[in-house]
Amino acid sequence: MENGSDFRDSFDKVLRHQSRLKSDVTANLESYAVTRADAQDAALAKSSALATQGNEYEVQRPIRSWLGKTTAFNDGKIGAHPDFLHLSGTDGFQYHYVTTMFVDIKNSTRLAIKYDLETVQWIKNSILRAASEVVRALDGHVHRFMGDALMAFFGGSSVHKESSALAAINCSAFLRLLMEVSVIPSLQTRGIDIRDLGFRVGLDFGDDSQVLWSSYGYSNVQEVTATSFHVDVSAKLQGMAAKDAAMLGQGLIDFLDFPETFYKIKNENRYGVKEPVPYLRPNFLKKDGESLNYVVRELDFRKFIRLLPIPAELKSSIAKDIINLSGVNFKAYSQESPENWSDYFSLSRCIRKDIPIKFLVIVSAALMAIHKSLTVTFTKTNYGREAAANTSITPEIINISISRRENTFHQTLPSSATFERNTAYRGIHIVEASIRTQANIEIFKDVIAVHIE
């Protein structure tokens, strides 16, 4: 499995690839005495060839590894969603759910004031390339680029509805993580002033009866896209988002029964006073003249990052209550077929009810050689309306003592602790694993989250 350094270095590799493209195309143009038109053709051909030779999937690889994807990368193409291509150039239409994402680069306009256009293009293209790779890593579909922004869809005719909606939220968190640990450091090392630069994300979900897919325009000037209030809301939410923030619409929050603990009401400073923004702006009027009051919330990145299936060493650098310790492995397994346990990576997909799921902490022999005994504490917390209705939201805490074991050669063996339950209530539920020494010093803490459909 990929480690945290692979993700930290991923944007740097994107930048190096961009630099190779630029320098090689320039050398190509200078080495031939050709006409202006020929030079343009040569540059395009050279750029295209180099792009296919370069490794464009560096951002995808660690993310897909952590999510347990069966393929190393997603090579989906930009444009019309492949599941609705049959509508191209026709007057037909199809109702089908989708989660829509709008992403833009906050404060990119000021780059043109400080840098020449080639440098601006290099920075913006590198960031948008990386952002599109995060989308594809989560099996989203990049629909189009728009200046310094992109539009993407999550979902389709062969995609699990809840898992794809959840993937969109995960994607927004990975975008923020990429900006924080990879994009900003890589640009800073190259002397780029990136003050106030960041991603802004808007997300909302429209169900099958709320999203219409069709072809717009004429046969040679047309595009297959989605028509929905929720698609439009996603664009407005992106405009409402602060730097490095993701705004979630009511459709997405309600559909996933997304826990309130992982989002918050956005606040804006108006004349030096913090003002909450609980509803979509503008607050449209309904047919009856009443305000729409469409609920919008900001993803609480610092809390939600704890749920992503990323290495504990990377997670602990962002979420301060996560404690990484070399020699400890915290994993989960689900039994979705009668005699087969498979890896379950935190919040990687939604699973059915009544599925056995097992959480396992393994402590290495080297650590057990240091500690005579340790206490592993599993804390299970349920969220969501179903759990609340069944009075099952009180955390369940299980303490398990593990002691040093030796083989016949007096060599210390690894030790483990297991916590097993069946999935029961729709929504997101988390299991936290903590390890304490005999002196009651906490030396490890991590979280695995499960979404039940």
Image: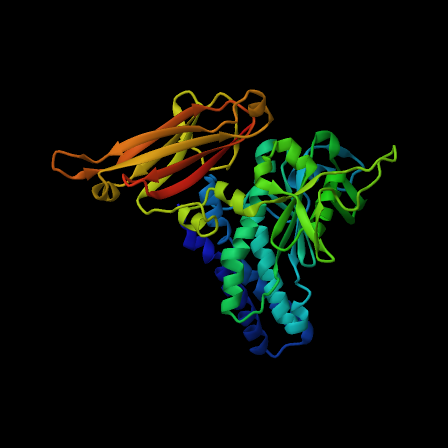
Relative to 249, does residue 104 appear above or below in the rendering? Answer: below
**Closest to the observer: 92 or 120?**
120
Residue 211: x, y in percent? Answer: 73, 35
**Closest to the observer: 27 or 187?**
187
Q: Is residue 38 left or right of residue 294?
A: left
- Residue at 63% across / 77% down in the picture? 34
**Closest to the observer: 171 or 366?**
366
Image quadrant where one finds the N terminus: top left
Q: Is residue 36 left or right of residue 62?
A: right
**Closest to the observer: 314 or 440?**
440
Question: Total number of numbered labels?
Answer: 0
Please tell me in which quadrant of the rendered image residue 425 appears: top right
- Residue at 84% across / 35% down in the picture? 290
Residue 332: x, y in percent? Answer: 41, 33
Relative to 105, does residue 296 appear above or below in the rendering? Answer: above
- Residue at 39% across / 36% down in the picture? 433
The colour scheme applied to this rendered structure is: rainbow
In this orientation, does residue 318 appear? Answer: yes
Image quadrant where one finds the C terminus: top right
Relative to 354, does residue 343 appear above or below in the rendering? Answer: below
Q: Is residue 193 left or right of residue 216?
A: left
In this orientation, does residue 225 appear? Answer: no
Relative to 297, does residue 245 appear above or below in the rendering? Answer: below
Residue 237: x, y in percent? Answer: 70, 47
Residue 8: x, y in percent? Answer: 46, 56
Please tell me in which quadrant of the rendered image residue 257 appears: top right
Q: Residue reaching furthest left?
A: 409
